[in-house]
Amino acid sequence: MKLKSTTIAAAATFPAVSALAVIRLTGPETFSIMDRVFSFHNRSRTAMSAPAAALSLGLIHDGDTSIDEVFAAFFHSPSSYTGEDMAEITCHGSPFITRRILGLLVSNGAVPAGPGDFTRRAFINGKMDLPQAEAVSALTCARSDETLKLALNQLFGSEKEPLEKIRLNLINAVALVEAQLDFEHGDSLEKEEIIKWINYTSADIGRLLRGARKASVIKNGVKITIAGSPNTGKSSLLNALLGRDRAIVADLPGTTRDTIEEEIIIDSIPFLLSDTAGLRLSNDPAENEGIKRSKASISSADAVIFTVDSSTPLSAEDAAAYAEISGRPHVVAMNKSDLKAAFSAEGAKKYLRITSPVITVSAKNGSNINLLTKSLKDIIISSGGIDSSSDPVVSEARHTAALEKALMELKRASDIVEKGGALETAAEHLKYASNGIAEITGEIASSDVLDAVFKNFCVGK
Ligand SMILES: Nc1nc2c(ncn2[C@@H]2O[C@H](COP(=O)(O)OP(=O)(O)OP(=O)(O)O)[C@@H](O)[C@H]2O)c(=O)[nH]1
Ligand SMILES: [Mg+2]
């Protein structure tokens, strides 16, 4: 691929008043533009002769007008982030100064950069592969130790080896299939060998996909909906889980209308909790809208906490509410255990035909709230969200989609081989699978794929 000939500039920091701001410049005109707008305090220096990758103090000026005293760093192609000549200006963190310097760079020949343009150039110039470029974006979004670890592993190339192994196995399988094409009906021993390679590769992809589900949980969190009939203590439970007074709690059934969403971290996993309107038949249009939202929240949840009020007998209303959630992964919270119980856990299990865990809790005094969170984690594990046996190596949705597609192509190929179908078609499917893997690493990268990858980057990254 060809180097871009323009020189681009952008602020790499957010435009807010701060101590410092950073402006970056990359491309063939970088040094000549800098020599026009930056004068070194050490007057013997120029952009070319300044020590590389070190800070030089000087003045940014627009002709005779001084703009700011700044540090400038110069990087020579190919030893820079983008692989091109680059400069970084660290100025005072006034959005006005940043805009003024950027305007100056543009009037001296630079072009304003778009989102991800610096990293896109780094990829095009072979400084990193596509997963590493994506890891750069993931790093800027890291919000916990776990997401940071995922992004760093990806940046250091953790996907390279397993993907390369899959691709080599696929090449092997294609070679075996093509060798068979010379025989009219194929040798059954060779066919077994082909199937063996396909299965072997499918297993490797399956392992990566299981890890990817875990990565998705770490990155995106799990969605937990608190549902049940009115007044059972859903909002109180949300507050107890959060450890603060977030939702309105009142004795009046039908208090919560809008769904309230908050996040808690349990063992490094973000749990997105939704408190919902109590499920019942109502004539109130606003309450009915709330109930509609409760149902939508239940159907999109990874797991549900179903609440019942253990101090009053269970009713047909509870049974109807339970029917709404029983098809989803769930745990039952028998709330208000600080009050005299009107029924036992066994009684609730019988009455509602509960098959999931039932936990006696009190949102009021906090009793067993820790058991409830543990149970939630167990549910997510047992529903396949966190597979402790597979490490999260792949964490980008784009990679997961490509792996799923490759797995489908492998299945098609193996079906054809098994049923004695056209081996040419089987080879085609194996090649599609192999191309899918090459798309992940960026060996095959259309500009559509690159646009999709870089559009979510920040400007200046
Ligand atoms: N004693 C006791 N009272 C509780 C407990 N949890 C909730 N309550 C009370 O039960 C009533 C209803 O609590 P909420 O948390 O508003 O119940 P809800 O399920 O959100 O109710 P809706 O939003 O109306 O569906 C309030 O008076 C709470 O103080 C508990 O663990 N013990
Ligand atoms: Mg409520």
Image (tube, helix red, strand yellow):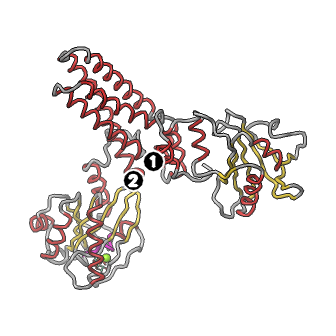
Which mark, by number, is residue 146?
1
Residue 160 sits in quarter = top left
Q: Looking at numbered disc 2 in the image, what kind of residue is underneath it?
A: Ile
Quadrant of picture, ligand 2: bottom left
Q: Is residue 277 left or right of residue 156?
A: left
Q: Are marks 1 and 2 in contact (CB under 8 Å)?
A: yes
Q: Look at the image and give the residue range highlighted in magenta.
A: 232-237
**Vertically, is 84 above or below 197?**
below
* Residue displayed at 26% across by 54% down: 379
Q: Nearer the viewer, residue 205 or 117?
A: 117
Mark toward the start of the polypeptide (1 vs 2): 1
Taking the magenta stretch, the answer to whether it contains residue 343 is no
Q: Is residue 184 left or right of residue 381?
A: left
Label of residue 269 in the image: 2
**Amino acid tagged 1:** Glu
Foreground of the two, 18 or 63: 63
Q: Secondary structure at mark 2?
A: strand
Residue sitting at 38 percent across and 75 percent down? 247
